[in-house]
Image: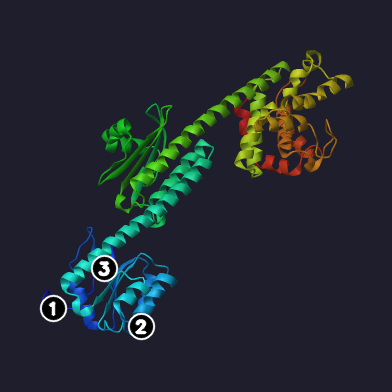
């Protein structure tokens, strides 16, 4: 290049720096003269900025530069000649870079050996360039100054873009987490979103960064999840405690994000002594989200965790109430509370086999125990009669379906409304000969079809005050004989597909 006195400095040797490293700034020299490439390379080869060296790319025409820019998306600075294959090749390339390639971040330093051919004022106004130099004035020092200024601006632009992308990731990840209503789904979902949040390209770095999440209650870790070296469920918590116990103790006191060369720790606590702990270690320089964005994400995740626990506790209480009421109804008819539990467990097997949604499976398991809740309104004379019912008594017994529906139908809770439908329809038959309304086929809610089959199976295969238990073989034979008559064929197929599990439940949940 040129020395401080304007004299030309010849290169000792022409060399190209092509170490493929993400910790290098990529510089592109576009000029149709080899000597310009050589002296520019010599002037730039020892420059280090922000602890990054330079990776130099070369193009000898505007068209060659365009192809390279389409391939290399993160060129930081371009030294661009104006006159190459045409008198305006460099200026035309500027418009292509900014408009066609939509690259707003790369810094463009326009260089010309014919300054009069392209007046500086017009170029600065008409073209989105960042500097304009005559080759004659570019001493080594001026070249250094121009490059560092351009790299500083490029770094700021890239950081702003990363923050924007990171914030979009945080918003997207937080939205995905907030939607989750189940603890099990929350654990896997949160870890998935953390990995997505911290990786620019998860598939290429997944083994270089390790992530650990601890779910805490009263500072005790309840359950954990992890990736990388924390993937093993049995050892992850011990491993974390052995390596980071002191840091975890400190961060629990002040809740500030702790970042050093080996790890990032985030701890977010809720008002009810629940909290989330996030640990990231490994090649943390590759993490693509700054601490403030991780803080926002973890704060929202901690609140969501708190809300899910509240919802879970409310649902558990509701389920306990349902089982209690259902057991009371069964005990009035001298049957055990395990009947309603078995029916719920059988129903879950069939619902899963039918590929019902998670929400539907949860609803049927929670509401199935209330299928006979209407028996509360049946007189002891009929309900507890040990022998066969008369026609009149049987008609009274049949009213338990409608009475159960009437008890539950006005609830504002989804589970209770589903229980109302099950109570009303679980004695309907596929061929339309059931009660109380003579529904048939798909007129019968799928939940009621499932629970109706489970109720019959359990009633036949267990002893009652009016009968001995049938053998499983006899019960299965009878149920198959009612295909298309009492039972919906597709529900029956699902039942038999889970036959082994059904038998296991029957055995383990004996009265």
Give 255 or 399, whichever is nearer the viewer. Answer: 255
Alpha carbon of mark 1 to alpha carbon of mark 2: how far? Answer: 27 Å
In the rendered image, residue 468, in percent from the top left (x then y), is placed at 74, 22
Q: Under tag 3, what secondary structure?
A: strand
Q: Is residue 125 visible?
A: yes
Alpha carbon of mark 1 to alpha carbon of mark 3: how far? Answer: 27 Å
Q: Which residue is drawn at the image coordinates 39% and 55% (left, top)?
A: 200
Which-is-in-front pick, marks 2 and 3?
A: 2
Q: Is residue 498 visible?
A: no
Q: Earlier in the sequence, mark 1 or mark 2?
A: 1
Q: Is residue 118 above or below residue 322?
A: below
Identify residue for label 2.
88
Res 202 → quadrant: bottom left
Label 2 environment density (alpha carbons within 10 Å; few <14, some 14–19, many ≥20): some
Give 156 or 125, whichever is nearer the viewer. Answer: 125
What scheme was used to colour the molecule?
A: rainbow
Which-is-in-front pick, marks 1 and 3?
A: 1
Alpha carbon of mark 2 to alpha carbon of mark 3: how far? Answer: 27 Å
Res 244 → quadrant: top left
Residue, far right: 391
Residue 121 relative to residue 273: left or right: left
Q: Check contact, mark 1 vs mark 2: CB within 8 A.
A: no
Residue 55 relative to residue 365: left or right: left
Identify residue for label 1.
6
Q: Under tag 2, what secondary structure?
A: loop
In the rendered image, residue 489, in percent from the top left (x then y), is placed at 75, 43
Identify residue for label 3.
55
Q: Is residue 375 above or below residue 105?
A: above
Give 408 or 388, whichever is nearer the viewer. Answer: 408
In the rendered image, residue 73, in percent from the top left (x then y), is placed at 37, 67
Q: Is residue 276 above or below residue 22?
A: above
Residue, far top: 381
């Amino acid at each position: 290049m040129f020395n401080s006195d304007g004299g030309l400095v010849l290169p000792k040797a022409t060399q190209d720096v092509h170490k493929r490293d993400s910790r290098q700034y990529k510089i592109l020299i576009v000029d149709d003269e080899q000597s310009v490439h050589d002296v520019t390379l010599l002037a730039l080869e020892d420059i280090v900025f922000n602890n990054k060296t330079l990776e130099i790319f070369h193009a000898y025409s505007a068209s060659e530069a365009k192809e390279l820019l389409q391939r290399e998306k993160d060129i930081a600075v371009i030294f661009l000649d104006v006159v190459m294959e045409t008198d305006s090749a460099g200026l035309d390339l500027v418009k292509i870079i900014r408009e066609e390639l939509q690259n707003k971040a790369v810094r463009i330093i326009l260089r010309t050996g014919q300054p009069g051919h392209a007046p500086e004022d017009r170029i600065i106004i008409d073209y989105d360039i960042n500097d304009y130099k005559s080759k004659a004035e570019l001493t080594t020092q001026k070249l250094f100054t121009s490059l560092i200024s351009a790299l500083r601006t490029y770094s700021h632009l890239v950081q702003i873009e990363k923050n924007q992308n990171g914030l979009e990731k945080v918003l997207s990840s937080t939205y995905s987490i907030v939607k989750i209503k189940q603890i099990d789904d929350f654990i896997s979902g949160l870890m998935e979103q953390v990995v997505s949040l911290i990786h620019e390209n998860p598939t290429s770095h997944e083994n270089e960064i390790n992530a650990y999440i601890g779910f805490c209650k009263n500072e005790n870790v309840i359950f954990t999840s992890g990736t990388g070296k924390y993937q093993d469920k049995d050892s992850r918590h011990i491993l974390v405690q052995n390596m980071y116990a002191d840091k975890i103790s400190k961060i629990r006191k002040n809740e500030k994000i702790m970042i050093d060369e080996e790890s990032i720790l985030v701890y977010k606590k809720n008002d009810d002594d629940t909290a989330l702990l996030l640990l990231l270690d490994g090649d943390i320089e590759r993490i693509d989200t700054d601490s403030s964005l991780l803080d926002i994400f973890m704060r929202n995740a901690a609140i969501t965790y708190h809300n899910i626990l509240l919802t879970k506790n409310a649902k558990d209480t509701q389920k306990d109430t349902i089982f209690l009421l259902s057991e009371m109804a069964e005990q009035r008819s001298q049957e055990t509370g395990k009947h309603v539990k078995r029916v719920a467990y059988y129903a879950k097997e069939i619902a899963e086999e039918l590929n019902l949604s998670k929400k539907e499976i949860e609803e049927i398991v929670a509401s199935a125990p209330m299928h006979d809740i209407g028996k509360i309104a049946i007189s002891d004379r009929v309900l507890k009669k040990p022998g066969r019912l008369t026609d009149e008594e049987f008609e009274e017994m049949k009213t338990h379906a409608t009475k159960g529906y009437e008890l539950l139908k006005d609830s504002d809770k989804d589970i209770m409304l589903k229980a109302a439908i099950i109570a009303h329809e679980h004695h309907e038959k596929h061929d339309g000969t059931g009660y109380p309304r003579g529904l048939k086929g798909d007129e019968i809610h799928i939940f009621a079809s499932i629970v109706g089959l489970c109720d019959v199976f359990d009633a036949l295969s267990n002893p009652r005050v009016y009968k001995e238990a049938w053998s499983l073989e006899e019960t299965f034979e009878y149920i198959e004989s009612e295909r298309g008559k009492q039972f919906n064929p597709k529900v029956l197929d699902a039942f038999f597909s889970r036959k082994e599990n059904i038998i296991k439940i029957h055995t383990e949940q004996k009265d």
